[in-house]
Image (tube, rainbow, N blue to C red):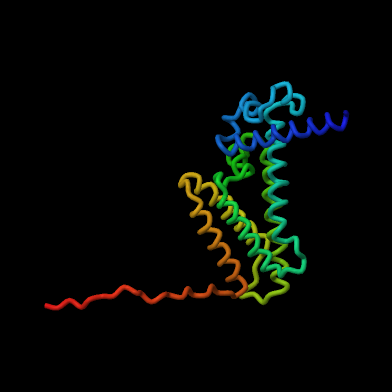
Amino acid sequence: MRKANAQRSAESQEKLVLAAQMLILRQGFAATTVDQICAEAGLTKGAFFHHFDGKEAIGHAALDAWGAMGTRLYSAAWSDPTLDPLAQLHRMFDIMISFTKREEPCTCVVGILSQELALSHPEFAAVCAKHLDDWTRHVARMLDGAQRSHPKAKPFDSQRVAGLLNAIWQGSMLIAKTRRTPAFIVANIELARAYVDALFGITPKPAVRKRSTIKTTRKTT
């Protein structure tokens, strides 16, 4: 009986966190209320306050859950230790692009809360920074590995390059929200991929131009 109750409690908590994430992605943290979270989760306010002290508490839980989910999804890039580090980076770019192919808009709870709360809520700023730094750290580690196993065109600081890639990723999702199209994100990720390749002296292969099948007629006078 206790085990069943504990499972139901865990499921309720997960529903509330997922509901908070969806509302934050849809309308931001400030516009989201506890009542809306409960309605989205299909649970009572009593269930909410059984798990969370208030809105800020579930905001932190939503952040941590999002960060853990992201790390789990991104880990497919580096989970195979036998894979070349540069190939791991390419797999990372592919994973990022795959997020743009989902039905829901490609946005990030960490990015949204960083923009909305970093200046007014230092505790949220610290948590957001941690999750952003985790992403940067994983990418920098792959860049370091690639530097050790590949000749490079010129020396570079892996941490700084990883920070730039993170800024491209987060900034692209921000701007794409205004354009309502994932194509902008994909184009920027492909530019980031080409930039990383160029650090190792790899140039993209030129596209093969197909000969036009359109016949032209010579104009006579």
Front in this rendered view, residue 210 or 45? 210
Q: Position of residue 2 (x, y in %)?
A: 88, 29
Q: Quadrant of residue 30?
A: top right
Q: Position of residue 206 (x, y in %)?
A: 49, 75
Farthest right residue?
2
Q: Quadrant of residue 190?
A: bottom right
Position above or below: 185 against 180: below
Q: Position of residue 127 (x, y in %)?
A: 70, 42
Query: In the picture, which quadrant includes the C terminus?
Result: bottom left
Front in this rendered view, residue 1 or 221? 1
Farthest left residue?
221
Q: Residue at x 72, y 56 (%)?
A: 75
Q: Quadrant of residue 7?
A: top right
Q: Residue at x 62, y 54 (%)?
A: 166
Q: Residue at x 61, y 60 (%)?
A: 94
Front in this rendered view, residue 144 or 100? 100
On the picture, is 180 further left or further right than 20?
left
Q: Position of residue 159 (x, y in %)?
A: 68, 60
